[in-house]
Image (cartoon, grey):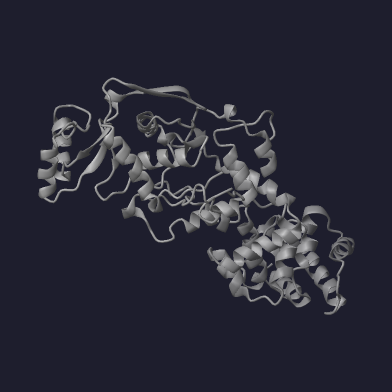
Amino acid sequence: MVLRIEDTDLKRNVPHGEDSQIDNLHWLGIDWDEGPDKPNPKYAPYHQSERQALYHRYVVKLLDEGLAYKDYATEDELTEMRDQQRAAGEAPHYDGRWYGRSVEDQKAAEAKGLKPSIRLHMPPDHVYAWDDIIKGHVAFNSDNMGGDFIIEKSNGMPTYNFAVVIDDYLMDITDVLRGDDHIANTPKQVAVYEALGIKMPNFGHITLIYNPKTRKKLSKRDKKTLQFISQYKNQGYLSEAIFNFIAFLGWSPVGEDEIFTRQELIERYDPSRMSKSPAYFDQQKLDWINAEYIKKLSLDDMTDRILELVDEGQTDVAKQVQALNLPDLREFVYQVSKIYQTEVHMLTEVMDKVVFYANILQSDIDYSQLSEFDHDDVLNVLKSFEKHVKDLGADVADPDFKGMIKAVGADTGVKGRALYFPLNVAFTGNSSAPEINEILRLYSISTIVDLLDKAIANV
């Protein structure tokens, strides 16, 4: 795998603009055999902006062979040409006005200070075709490709469709898999391959990702879908889950299994099983896959990943955890992870629980949830549990909360929901809670007593 930075569009370049992309690839576990940071002297450099002389050598070759020519048309002239074509009901195309022009005409244009762009001449009624790995046989007629197209801009930089051909050729690229939106670029690239008389690689155009509700391709304007890999990372999606999920967009393995390690995906990957139909982004499926990967983490690994997100502080909840200033944050996060590991879809959900339980005394708990139970039974359960807690003393290292709950049931004669719901509400604010005895371990004895006092007063 080759990492190449295609940065010929100087207006859109930002210094170190590729850094975030490289970081995201590394986070996903995607590495490359060669690239800017792993140069192979035979193929370097890997930034297209550093390869200008290489491209120009092939431009000169095409000019010398009469397969390309200089075009001095100004932007105003090109705009007027396209406007006239639209008015005549024609598809906008370059009309070849500078093809075959004399050297005198060229000198006259340069005397006016005009700098030429270089266009590749397209033979009329010529078919450019390839056998696509995914789509099968694809063909375009030169008459429908917009006319002679620019291969080198007036500033001396190559266009994308020319630079990638030269790079693929010089870098010995064998296979190019890219998005379906590149399908219109490929015939132009095939034209360059043919003009230069060089062998082209195998092309495969992968289906784009669509929004299942709008049935349209995902858009940066679709604010209901997270746009960037970094957003998924910050929300607590695991890199392994994202990798697994993306691999299944437009592709499927043999069988019904959906959870695969990276190595298993590499071993099973078969381009012939790529789909021609649009891939639909299923948020629920992503959440399910992420939950499955979270369940498989060791608690230490899960805790480390959560604390890394906290340290990076890229979300509101991460900043809230930072602001807690807990003396032993790692242990607290570990215990909360232990309770909720099988229930969450994202690591930020654990962080929400950390903030909630750390601030439990300030929580606005709705005790009206207990109105369906006998008032006296509720009070008896709460008071009985408080008595058992106070009997413990403050220095008990490992209280047997499960045994204490059973003792409360025996003391009060209250069982089942009527026993557990009052305790759930008192200590979590919710009538339904996971192992309440594990949640109680998050609190100091004094916090437990304060919560019981608050519940008793409110009930």
| Residue 53 spot, x, y in % from top left | 36, 49
- Which residue is located at x 14 percent, y 44 percent? 76
Residue 145, by quadrant, is: top left
Looking at the rendered image, the quarter that the C terminus falls into is bottom right
How many tags in the picture? 0
| Residue 303 spot, x, y in % from top left | 70, 62
Task: Say which of 62 and 310 sits in front.
Answer: 62
Task: Say which of 422 and 45 sits in front.
Answer: 45
Q: Residue furthest bottom?
A: 394
The answer to whether residue 433 is visible is no
| Residue 382 spot, x, y in % from top left | 77, 67
| Residue 136 spot, x, y in % from top left | 49, 22
Task: Say which of 43 and 294 sits in front.
Answer: 43
In-image side of 207 versus 128 (left or right): right
In-image side of 253 versus 187 (left or right): right
Looking at the rendered image, the quarter that the N terminus falls into is top right
- Which residue is located at x 50 percent, y 36 percent? 177
- Which residue is located at x 10 percent, y 49 percent? 111
Task: Say which of 214 and 173 sits in front.
Answer: 173
Q: Image height check: is 215 above or below 440?
A: above
The answer to whether residue 57 is visible is yes
In-image side of 183 versus 59 (left or right): right
